[in-house]
Amino acid sequence: MARKFFVGGNFKMNGSKASIKQIVESLNAAELPTDVEIVIAPPALYLHWAHDHLKDTKVELAAQNAFPKDNGAYTGEIAAPQIKDVGATWVILGHSERRTIIKESDEFVADKTKHVLEHDLGVILCIGETLEERDAGMTLEVCNRQLDAVCDVIKDWSRIVVAYEPVWAIGTGLAATPDDAQFTHHEIRKHLTEKLGEEQANSIRIIYGGSVNGKNAASFNACADIDGYLVGGASLKPEFIDIVNSRQ
Ligand code: 13P
Protein backbone atom coordinates (compact mmCIF):
# COMPACT_ATOMS: atom_id res chain seq x y z
CA MET A 1 0.00 0.00 0.00
CA ALA A 2 1.36 3.43 -0.93
CA ARG A 3 2.16 5.62 2.04
CA LYS A 4 0.25 8.90 1.93
CA PHE A 5 2.57 11.91 2.06
CA PHE A 6 2.24 13.68 5.40
CA VAL A 7 3.11 17.28 6.25
CA GLY A 8 2.80 18.51 9.81
CA GLY A 9 3.24 22.04 11.08
CA ASN A 10 4.43 22.28 14.68
CA PHE A 11 3.85 25.85 15.82
CA LYS A 12 5.59 25.10 19.16
CA MET A 13 5.01 27.88 21.75
CA ASN A 14 4.31 30.50 19.09
CA GLY A 15 1.31 32.46 17.93
CA SER A 16 -1.64 34.47 19.08
CA LYS A 17 -5.32 34.46 18.23
CA ALA A 18 -4.62 36.93 15.43
CA SER A 19 -1.62 35.14 13.90
CA ILE A 20 -3.16 31.67 14.13
CA LYS A 21 -6.39 32.90 12.54
CA GLN A 22 -4.29 34.32 9.71
CA ILE A 23 -2.46 31.00 9.14
CA VAL A 24 -5.73 29.07 9.20
CA GLU A 25 -7.36 31.51 6.78
CA SER A 26 -4.43 31.20 4.38
CA LEU A 27 -4.85 27.40 4.46
CA ASN A 28 -8.60 27.83 3.86
CA ALA A 29 -7.84 29.98 0.81
CA ALA A 30 -5.09 27.77 -0.65
CA GLU A 31 -5.62 25.06 -3.19
CA LEU A 32 -4.35 22.07 -1.26
CA PRO A 33 -3.47 18.69 -2.77
CA THR A 34 -5.79 15.80 -1.90
CA ASP A 35 -3.00 13.24 -1.77
CA VAL A 36 -1.20 14.89 1.15
CA GLU A 37 -2.23 14.55 4.78
CA ILE A 38 -1.90 18.00 6.35
CA VAL A 39 -1.86 18.48 10.11
CA ILE A 40 -1.17 21.67 12.04
CA ALA A 41 -0.30 21.80 15.73
CA PRO A 42 -0.96 25.17 17.32
CA PRO A 43 -0.42 25.55 21.08
CA ALA A 44 -3.17 23.69 22.99
CA LEU A 45 -4.77 26.97 24.04
CA TYR A 46 -5.58 27.73 20.41
CA LEU A 47 -6.73 24.30 19.18
CA HIS A 48 -10.38 25.19 19.64
CA TRP A 49 -9.85 28.57 18.00
CA ALA A 50 -8.08 26.98 15.04
CA HIS A 51 -10.80 24.35 14.74
CA ASP A 52 -13.50 27.05 14.67
CA HIS A 53 -11.75 28.89 11.84
CA LEU A 54 -10.67 25.92 9.71
CA LYS A 55 -13.01 25.54 6.78
CA ASP A 56 -10.98 23.04 4.84
CA THR A 57 -11.63 19.64 6.36
CA LYS A 58 -8.49 18.41 4.59
CA VAL A 59 -6.44 20.08 7.33
CA GLU A 60 -6.38 18.26 10.65
CA LEU A 61 -5.28 19.45 14.06
CA ALA A 62 -2.72 18.03 16.46
CA ALA A 63 -1.93 18.82 20.08
CA GLN A 64 1.76 19.14 20.91
CA ASN A 65 1.56 16.95 24.01
CA ALA A 66 -0.84 14.93 26.18
CA PHE A 67 -0.75 13.46 29.68
CA PRO A 68 -1.43 9.72 30.08
CA LYS A 69 -4.51 10.11 32.28
CA ASP A 70 -8.11 10.91 31.29
CA ASN A 71 -8.64 13.58 33.96
CA GLY A 72 -7.72 14.38 37.55
CA ALA A 73 -5.31 16.33 39.72
CA TYR A 74 -2.54 16.92 37.17
CA THR A 75 -2.11 20.68 37.20
CA GLY A 76 -1.13 22.16 33.88
CA GLU A 77 -1.51 18.94 31.87
CA ILE A 78 -3.95 18.21 29.04
CA ALA A 79 -5.86 14.98 28.49
CA ALA A 80 -6.55 13.02 25.31
CA PRO A 81 -10.36 13.28 25.75
CA GLN A 82 -10.00 17.08 25.98
CA ILE A 83 -7.89 17.12 22.83
CA LYS A 84 -10.59 15.18 21.01
CA ASP A 85 -13.30 17.36 22.50
CA VAL A 86 -11.89 20.47 20.80
CA GLY A 87 -11.64 18.75 17.43
CA ALA A 88 -8.02 17.61 17.18
CA THR A 89 -7.24 14.17 15.77
CA TRP A 90 -3.48 13.89 16.35
CA VAL A 91 -0.95 14.40 19.14
CA ILE A 92 2.77 15.08 18.77
CA LEU A 93 4.67 13.06 21.37
CA GLY A 94 8.35 12.69 22.23
CA HIS A 95 9.46 15.94 20.64
CA SER A 96 13.14 16.50 21.42
CA GLU A 97 12.31 19.78 23.13
CA ARG A 98 10.25 17.80 25.63
CA ARG A 99 12.77 14.98 25.88
CA THR A 100 15.70 17.33 26.53
CA ILE A 101 14.21 20.41 28.25
CA ILE A 102 11.35 18.77 30.19
CA LYS A 103 13.40 15.55 30.65
CA GLU A 104 10.71 13.16 29.38
CA SER A 105 12.01 9.59 29.40
CA ASP A 106 11.57 7.06 26.58
CA GLU A 107 9.24 5.10 28.85
CA PHE A 108 7.07 8.12 29.63
CA VAL A 109 6.78 8.93 25.92
CA ALA A 110 5.81 5.29 25.27
CA ASP A 111 3.22 5.38 28.05
CA LYS A 112 1.72 8.55 26.58
CA THR A 113 1.71 7.04 23.10
CA LYS A 114 -0.21 4.02 24.35
CA HIS A 115 -2.74 6.17 26.17
CA VAL A 116 -3.32 8.54 23.26
CA LEU A 117 -3.80 5.66 20.79
CA GLU A 118 -6.36 4.11 23.14
CA HIS A 119 -8.37 7.30 22.68
CA ASP A 120 -8.33 6.82 18.93
CA LEU A 121 -6.07 9.77 18.22
CA GLY A 122 -3.10 9.53 15.86
CA VAL A 123 0.42 10.00 17.22
CA ILE A 124 3.29 11.84 15.57
CA LEU A 125 6.12 10.13 17.43
CA CYS A 126 9.32 12.18 17.34
CA ILE A 127 12.72 10.58 17.64
CA GLY A 128 16.24 11.78 16.91
CA GLU A 129 19.74 12.22 18.22
CA THR A 130 21.53 15.25 19.66
CA LEU A 131 24.71 16.63 18.09
CA GLU A 132 26.87 14.94 20.77
CA GLU A 133 25.17 11.62 20.09
CA ARG A 134 25.65 12.06 16.35
CA ASP A 135 29.33 12.95 16.80
CA ALA A 136 29.73 9.84 18.94
CA GLY A 137 28.28 7.72 16.10
CA MET A 138 25.17 6.90 18.15
CA THR A 139 22.44 8.12 15.77
CA LEU A 140 20.87 4.73 15.08
CA GLU A 141 21.37 3.48 18.62
CA VAL A 142 19.45 6.48 19.99
CA CYS A 143 16.64 6.24 17.40
CA ASN A 144 16.28 2.50 17.97
CA ARG A 145 16.21 2.93 21.75
CA GLN A 146 13.48 5.57 21.47
CA LEU A 147 11.48 3.35 19.09
CA ASP A 148 11.97 0.20 21.19
CA ALA A 149 10.35 1.80 24.24
CA VAL A 150 7.21 2.24 22.13
CA CYS A 151 7.52 -1.19 20.44
CA ASP A 152 7.51 -2.72 23.94
CA VAL A 153 3.99 -1.44 24.60
CA ILE A 154 2.43 -1.00 21.13
CA LYS A 155 2.05 -3.73 18.53
CA ASP A 156 -0.34 -1.93 16.15
CA TRP A 157 1.46 1.09 14.66
CA SER A 158 -1.22 1.92 12.08
CA ARG A 159 -2.00 5.29 13.74
CA ILE A 160 1.62 6.26 14.41
CA VAL A 161 3.66 8.51 12.13
CA VAL A 162 7.36 8.47 13.05
CA ALA A 163 9.06 11.87 12.80
CA TYR A 164 12.84 11.63 12.58
CA GLU A 165 14.08 14.98 13.81
CA PRO A 166 17.82 15.18 14.42
CA VAL A 167 18.18 17.71 17.23
CA TRP A 168 21.13 19.41 15.54
CA ALA A 169 18.94 20.25 12.54
CA ILE A 170 16.04 21.75 14.50
CA GLY A 171 15.82 25.53 14.29
CA THR A 172 19.42 25.80 13.08
CA GLY A 173 18.85 26.34 9.37
CA LEU A 174 21.09 23.28 8.85
CA ALA A 175 18.80 20.59 7.51
CA ALA A 176 20.16 17.08 7.09
CA THR A 177 21.25 16.40 3.53
CA PRO A 178 18.82 14.25 1.52
CA ASP A 179 21.37 11.39 1.46
CA ASP A 180 21.94 11.60 5.18
CA ALA A 181 18.24 11.73 6.01
CA GLN A 182 17.39 8.93 3.56
CA PHE A 183 20.10 6.71 5.09
CA THR A 184 18.72 7.19 8.61
CA HIS A 185 15.10 6.77 7.50
CA HIS A 186 16.04 3.55 5.72
CA GLU A 187 17.76 2.24 8.85
CA ILE A 188 14.75 3.23 10.98
CA ARG A 189 12.47 1.28 8.65
CA LYS A 190 14.85 -1.68 8.77
CA HIS A 191 14.72 -1.62 12.55
CA LEU A 192 10.92 -1.39 12.53
CA THR A 193 10.86 -4.36 10.13
CA GLU A 194 12.81 -6.40 12.67
CA LYS A 195 10.51 -5.35 15.50
CA LEU A 196 7.10 -5.29 13.76
CA GLY A 197 7.44 -7.27 10.54
CA GLU A 198 7.86 -6.15 6.96
CA GLU A 199 4.22 -5.45 6.15
CA GLN A 200 3.69 -3.11 9.06
CA ALA A 201 7.08 -1.41 8.73
CA ASN A 202 6.44 -0.73 5.05
CA SER A 203 3.15 0.99 5.85
CA ILE A 204 4.50 3.36 8.54
CA ARG A 205 5.09 6.93 7.44
CA ILE A 206 8.55 8.15 8.48
CA ILE A 207 8.70 11.92 8.09
CA TYR A 208 11.70 14.21 8.42
CA GLY A 209 11.93 17.31 10.60
CA GLY A 210 14.68 19.87 11.04
CA SER A 211 14.97 23.17 9.16
CA VAL A 212 12.64 22.13 6.34
CA ASN A 213 11.54 25.18 4.36
CA GLY A 214 9.89 26.15 1.11
CA LYS A 215 13.20 26.09 -0.73
CA ASN A 216 14.73 22.80 0.42
CA ALA A 217 11.62 20.58 0.77
CA ALA A 218 11.67 19.37 -2.84
CA SER A 219 15.33 18.33 -2.50
CA PHE A 220 14.12 15.28 -0.52
CA ASN A 221 11.73 14.16 -3.28
CA ALA A 222 13.93 11.33 -4.49
CA CYS A 223 14.29 9.84 -0.98
CA ALA A 224 12.30 6.61 -0.99
CA ASP A 225 11.91 6.41 2.79
CA ILE A 226 10.97 10.04 3.43
CA ASP A 227 7.18 10.20 3.59
CA GLY A 228 6.76 13.84 4.49
CA TYR A 229 7.90 16.52 6.92
CA LEU A 230 7.37 17.89 10.38
CA VAL A 231 7.92 21.59 9.97
CA GLY A 232 8.64 24.04 12.78
CA GLY A 233 9.50 27.66 11.98
CA ALA A 234 8.38 27.56 8.35
CA SER A 235 4.92 26.30 9.35
CA LEU A 236 4.22 29.80 10.68
CA LYS A 237 4.93 31.35 7.28
CA PRO A 238 3.21 31.31 3.88
CA GLU A 239 5.96 28.96 2.60
CA PHE A 240 4.27 26.14 4.56
CA ILE A 241 1.94 25.80 1.57
CA ASP A 242 4.97 25.40 -0.73
CA ILE A 243 6.17 22.57 1.52
CA VAL A 244 2.73 20.93 1.39
CA ASN A 245 2.94 21.15 -2.42
CA SER A 246 6.60 20.15 -2.70
CA ARG A 247 5.83 16.65 -4.05
CA GLN A 248 3.46 17.88 -6.76
P1 13P B 1 12.30 23.70 12.51
O1 13P B 1 11.56 23.39 11.24
O2 13P B 1 12.04 25.10 13.02
O3 13P B 1 13.75 23.35 12.42
O4 13P B 1 11.67 22.73 13.65
C1 13P B 1 11.50 21.39 13.39
C2 13P B 1 10.71 20.80 14.48
O5 13P B 1 11.15 20.69 15.61
C3 13P B 1 9.34 20.36 14.16
O6 13P B 1 8.80 19.60 15.20
Image (cartoon, rainbow, N blue to C red):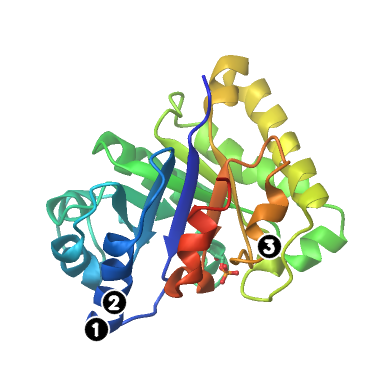
Whether pointer 2 and pointer 3 mark residues with C-beta atoms closer than 8 Å, the reply is no
Viewer-nearest residue: 74 or 16: 16
Q: Which residue is mark 2?
A: 22
- Whichever of labels 3 and 1 marks the residue nearer the N terminus, that label is 1
Residue type at numbered disc 1:
Ala
Residue 189 in the image: state x and y as whole percent: 67, 31
Tell me the element at label 1: helix
Mark 2 is on which residue type?
Gln
- Which residue in the structure is indicated by mark 1? 18
Q: Quadrant of ligand 1?
A: bottom right
- Identify the amino acid type marked 3: Asn
Could you tell me residue 130's position as x and y percent?
71, 64
**SS assignment at label 3:** loop
Residue at image position (23%, 39%) is 119
Q: Position of residue 143 (x, y in %)?
A: 67, 46
Name the mark nearer the viewer: 1 or 2.
2
Picture quadrant where residue 61 is located? bottom left
**Between residues 152 and 166, which one lies in front from this camera angle?**
166
The answer for how far apart the CA atoms under marks 3 and 1 are is 28 Å
Residue at x 70% of width, y 35% of height:
224
**141 sits left or right of 3 in the view:** right
User: Label 3 belongs to which residue?
Assistant: 216
